Amino acid sequence: MPIGSRFAAAILDLLLGFFIAFALAGTTRLDIKLLVILIFVAGYLYRLLFHASPGQQMMQLGHPLATFPAALAIILYAGLTFSLGAFVRPLVDAKLTSKAIDAKAVAWQPPAFHAAGVSQWIDGAVLTVPGAVNGWKPELAHCCVFYGPYVPEQSQPGLMITVLPTNHPYEYCRGAANRWARYLAGCDEGPLAFQRAFLEASREQRNRALSPLAVVRRNFALIARSQTLEDMNPGTELRVFQRGGTQIIWIVGTLKLKKETGQYAPVDHFFLADDQNALGVDLIWKQIPRDPSIAEQVASSLRMLPRNEVASGLAQQAGIPRLYNATRAANYTVITVDELIAAVQAGGTPRERHYLATHLTTLGQTQPALRLEPR
């Protein structure tokens, strides 16, 4: 065999040995040094038995200039797919929560509700909340709706409803600056495709990956699913329903409020995604029993609404609810904020005044024109 072909065969043999060791390291958990020795011995015995190494046998299949690139491509593709998959599988599985991975998704249709409520547009999503919960009226903030007594700097019983992009796993994509990290995670496919990927993620699907990219994305989706659903109660299902182009996932779980005291609260998590946006809606029941009918009422109202349709889509609102919708839709311009400040100061609760002042102070750090204080 010409010296060039021998050199090419050596490269193929080294790659074969590397990928085999890579796969065995993941599946057997043996020491890598021991695996290198075992593979070297196996390669030596193979050469004695067949009078040629695997790489040399490949190079003898045809013309070296055609055979080497083809063999190299096959080894790299198979190695990166199956060896990488075998190596990362136990590492990923160690991070997974079985209750989240094994939970079944079921199609669900929210019932129709005709009870009056307060409709709010927050970060692209619309939800209608009850006019009262256990006798408490809703109190509004830029991201949230509160029901219950209010004492500053103290945790109080009641229902807290939050609507935040950070409540959704797609927030990882918004914070990923590296374009390759975004590509490998599937962020560039859009929020809806990203949500569907973690909803459909399973060990069986991961094990059937037939490309290096599929290996990476399906393992990432498994981790995203496990972390996203870690609060869900064991034995519960993922309810999935559609509102136009928006997919909504609903889970019921238990949220740990304070690690120091071990306080827990029932929580309803809703994950919303369409082609342009993704966010999460949480109903946190602090020191009060969870009311499934209220959760269903909120679920039945959830939908995405573009910013430019807020004025017409929520025209029936009045007072502070209307001004909050208008202010959010206008992205807190000075004119709408001024109107909201006046309304909250005149008729808002102490909690509403506190949260508005706090939010305006935060906005003022990046938008000097909004350095306003409630009058």
Image (spheres, helix red, strand yellow):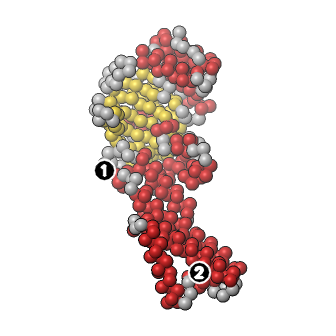
Indicate the position of residue 98 as horizontal and vertical percent values.
Answer: 35, 54
Label 2 sits on residue: 55
Asked if residue 137 shows in the view, the reply is no
Q: Residues within 10 Å of mark 2 (few under 14, many from 20)?
A: many
Q: Position of residue 311 (x, y in %)?
A: 58, 26
Q: Which mark is residue 189?
A: none
Return the x and y of residue 219 as percentages of the image width and height.
48, 57
Residue type at mark 1? Gly
N-terminal label among 1 and 2: 2
Give 68 or 281, whichever is nearer the viewer: 68
Horizontal side of residue 125 vs 297, given as left or right: right
For the residue pair 372 and 344, the one nearer the viewer reads as 372
Residue 80 found in image quarter = bottom right
Image disc number at residue 235: 1
Q: Is residue 151 left or right of residue 80?
A: left
Identify the residue at horizontal 34%, vertical 51% (top origin): 99
CA distance for labels 1 and 2: 52 Å
Q: Is residue 51 above or below residue 119?
A: below
